[in-house]
Amino acid sequence: MKHLKERLGREWLFCDGGSGTILQKKGLRPGELPESWNITHQEEVMDLYCGYLNAGSDIFNANTFGANRFHYPDNLEEVVTQGILLAKKARKKTGREDAYIALDIGPTGKLLEPMGDLSFDEAVEAFAQIVQIGVKAGADLVLIETMSDSYETKAAVLAAKENCDLPVLTTVTFDSKGKLLTGGNVESIVSMLEGLRVDALGINCSLGPREMLPIIQKFTEISSLPVIVNPNAGLPKTKNGITYYDIDAEEFSSCMSDIADLGVQVIGGCCGTTPKHIQNTIEAVRNKAFIPARKKTKTFVSSYSQAVEINDVTKIIGERINPTGKKAFKQALRDMDIDYILKEGLKQEDAGAHILDVNVGLPEIDEPMMMEMVVKRLQAITSLPLQIDTSDPAALEKGMRYYNGKPMINSVNGKKESMDIIFPLVRKYGGVVVALCLDENGIPDNADGRIAIAQKILSVAGSYGIDKKDIVFDGLAMTISSDTKSAVVTLETIRRIHEELGCHTILGVSNISFGLPQRQMINSFFLAMAMENGLSCAIINPNNESMMSAYRTANALLNHDPQCMEYIASYANATVTTVTTQKQPVSETGKPVPVEGMSLFTSIERGMVKEAEEATKKELSEQKDPLDIINDMLIPALDKVGQGFEKGTVYLPQLLMSADAAKAAFSVLKEAMKGEEKEVKGTIILATVKGDIHDIGKNIVKVMLENYGYEVIDLGKDVPPETIVATAIERNIKLVGLSALMTTTVPSMEETIKLLRKEKPDTKVVVGGAVLTQEYADMIGADAYGKDAIATVRYADSVFEKE
Amino acid sequence: MIQPDIDEIRRYLGMSKTAHDPVTDGMIQECIQKLQAVIQPVHLYAYYPLTITDDTFHFASLSFSSKSLQRNMEGCEEICVLACTIGIGADRLIRKTELTSISEAAVMQATASAMAEAYCEHVNDLIKEETAQRNLYCRPRFSPGYGDLSLTLQKDIFSLLHLTKNLGITLSESLLMIPTKSITALIGISDTCRSFTQNLCNTCNMQNTCNYRRKDEL
């Protein structure tokens, strides 16, 4: 048998059609697990296979779509092995020894962390198990299909690649608007899958062939790999309570014939299609001219939801997630205050960044662990692609592995040692890599030398199978204060890399002005000049308005801003300033307009964030002691609102607005008290118990406790009892707050309390959550019931006052 | 466009219908707008012939017992199983909002719940229309976790409707749905119109202590 990889992309290949719909006709009851029939109804499964083999399918799926450890905890190996053995039998029986058996892998049914409760590693492990069994049983390829989450898709592809050498084909499911159910689009998923080096990719299920047309068109425009198309037999319809698909074999094959003309390479069907559909399709398409997939030259980096194209319109890479020269950021890393880092990301997104650089390196921390954590948390809240920035190969690999999309990588250079380490990682995980034009001999002081290094890097990358479109060259901006011709050299380098090598470029812009006064004047002019010379990516601080105004202005002048829309939108109502200011967040509707000179007490009472910040600054400027401000104004204001809440005259949103305002005031004070020993009333653990994923209640309590002077160790959601107890012992914690929203997760709260009583009996426990009551709290052995956030604060006060 | 019930959002936030607070009202409107931009509402439902013996239900490959559901579906010979979600975008937005404003996050949470509820109501209406065309009547919808109807039924509903594949809804180890703003429900269908006003609170075992109880409907 000719190897599939030799045929894929060189000639028409045909997949099979629906299986669930056919097994149902043979008696599979709705809701019954179809793969269990590999053991109980072998003849029917054989029939299914033979139907498609006789119809002419080149690739047919073993009945293993839902076979994973979650659905078959006890007999996974048997189910998968039988599914493949039956396929082998069917192949023999029909004389179709030329057909390929696909180990069919569908979604696990679980959502990955941090949104869901399955860790990426567990997902890879679960898929790896299926792959190992399938390979052992004799599958010819791995088909990962019907995926709607790019992160789970990545886990499955990695598992396949790490456990076999078989071809890996991957198809995902889109809605009619061309989006994945988790938000991705064609560009984002194709870039990720190409980066992971699957052998073919495409779309299946959910839509009929007609609805798929615009999406398929997009696929053929973007993908350099063979495209697979496996539609349903139309959209599901219901009549008199029965679900059916209404496109018959004739109509289906005529639609598929049109789809074949779009330049796809692998064709089959999904739900509702039958051997007849496939047979007619093969007849209609087989003799058509076959168009191989063409190599595409566009460069994309992607997140879970979008792809950003690197091209002649300069993209902003936000540089603020980086501890260099930032005291507060360094402290956040040491304290594992991930929220601080996330907020830095959100600020830059609001300010207009297209990509976020992520550098979390600090000598005293575990950088690989930190990189993994920050990448996982950051990609859950921002839709911007990330640039993994580290000199530690272990941290780089963690960042790339856990990244949900195709990342940017910062960086490789012309040294052999660097390329030996970085390129294999890019080959495995995919990515667009920043390449510095320097090597063992240092940085050439002229453009010719830098371009020669760029050419060397390109050729070595090529030997790893890394395409030139996936390399972005750093022209190396170095300060003009030590060599006044350095800006000219850098500009010439980027222009010539663009023109002579046809590659994209990037600069860390602000290096140009090191050691000079008024750096932003130099930086902003240099940015505009670099843009004119074709710069593709600028690493800058997007919160710096003079950089962003230079950026928007240059875009308008370079014809990169159609109708000057972005320029007008940004500046039509602006007053020109030359000082560095952060872009002010848009005022929120419904909120009162800022009142100047409002007292701190009033601004907290009314829940006004900006005013609270201003008032705090004013108090500080009058030389008031920060601790006095807290004790004489902040806490009394919070108390007043809290009492109102207890009496029922103040509602939850108002209470929380005050909490937000107090929090803002605190961060101003914290800044002022830098270096001083902060006074902490006590340290409290908060956690949402194992099994529960609802954490807003816990987060509300956290903000309130912090405002009242407590240090909170937030263990997050879905926290096992062991973690809570271990932390309580390690930090000698007096009070633990547990939250559960569902009656079903209260038992795990009880379990946590029991374990605490046993291992750390002097720790008090306060519990809260929608289903809890005083009675319930007593029943599970808690010390107190926190009916709401204020009640929890009061209880904490009573615990810590006793000391 | 899903239009959530504003009073319902206020109830989730612990506010009475008469409590007037323009700031919260403004925040609710803002949250609705932000959510509209990120939600991906999808739904699915299917009908099955139903037999009920005592309090045991049989349809498709499912079989389970529930006294509460039996009271709701007495006399029904058909059941509709529905599922809907407004998508993971709402969860992401809530998470993001928590970082910058806990008050807005609380309102966002309540608003997203009300939007899921409103969307489910809309799907329920579609089912009612289809049922009416067949001269049949729908009972009020009933979800796993109500009364004595076990949450473990979720597993069966998930395999029955292939919810992960079809709607992108997943089920956690502890049987919670993610995206969290998702609803599954059962609707009994019969040929007799049995109009009873249902306050679901009365079937709930938390009814005497719950903060969210619909007091005005007792």
Image (cartoon, grey):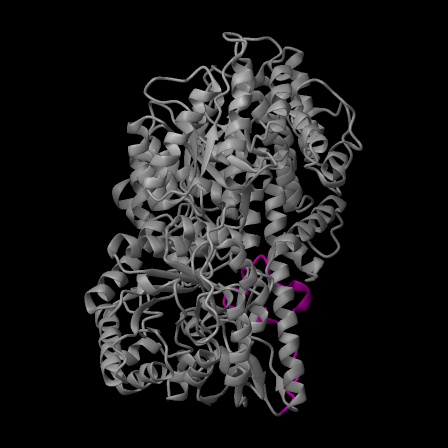
Q: Quadrant of the C terminus of chain A?
A: top left
Q: Is residue B209 magenta?
A: yes
Residue A215, percent from left and from top: 56, 62
Q: As rendered, which of A591 and A768 lies closer to the eye?
A: A591
Residue A603, percent from left and from top: 70, 30
> Residue extending furthest left?
A136
Q: Residue at x 45, y 27 (%)?
A: A332
Indicate left or right for A319 with A604 as reference.
left
Residue A546, percent from left and from top: 66, 22
Indicate left or right for B75 with A135 as reference.
right
Q: Residue at x 65, y 77 (%)?
A: B126
| Figure quadrant of residue A365 | top left
Q: Is residue A248 visible?
A: no
| Figure quadrant of residue B171 | bottom left
Q: Quadrant of the N terminus of chain A?
A: bottom left
Q: Is residue A77 visible?
A: yes
Name the magenta segment's main secondary structure: loop
Q: As rendered, which of A201 and A25 lies closer to the eye?
A: A201
| Figure quadrant of residue A732 | top left
Residue A755, percent from left and from top: 29, 48
Q: State the count of labels.
A: 0
Q: As rendered, which of A516 and A484 lies closer to the eye?
A: A484
Q: Which residues are magenta?
A: B192-218
Q: Is residue B197 magenta?
A: yes
Q: Residue at x 62, y 11 (%)?
A: A518
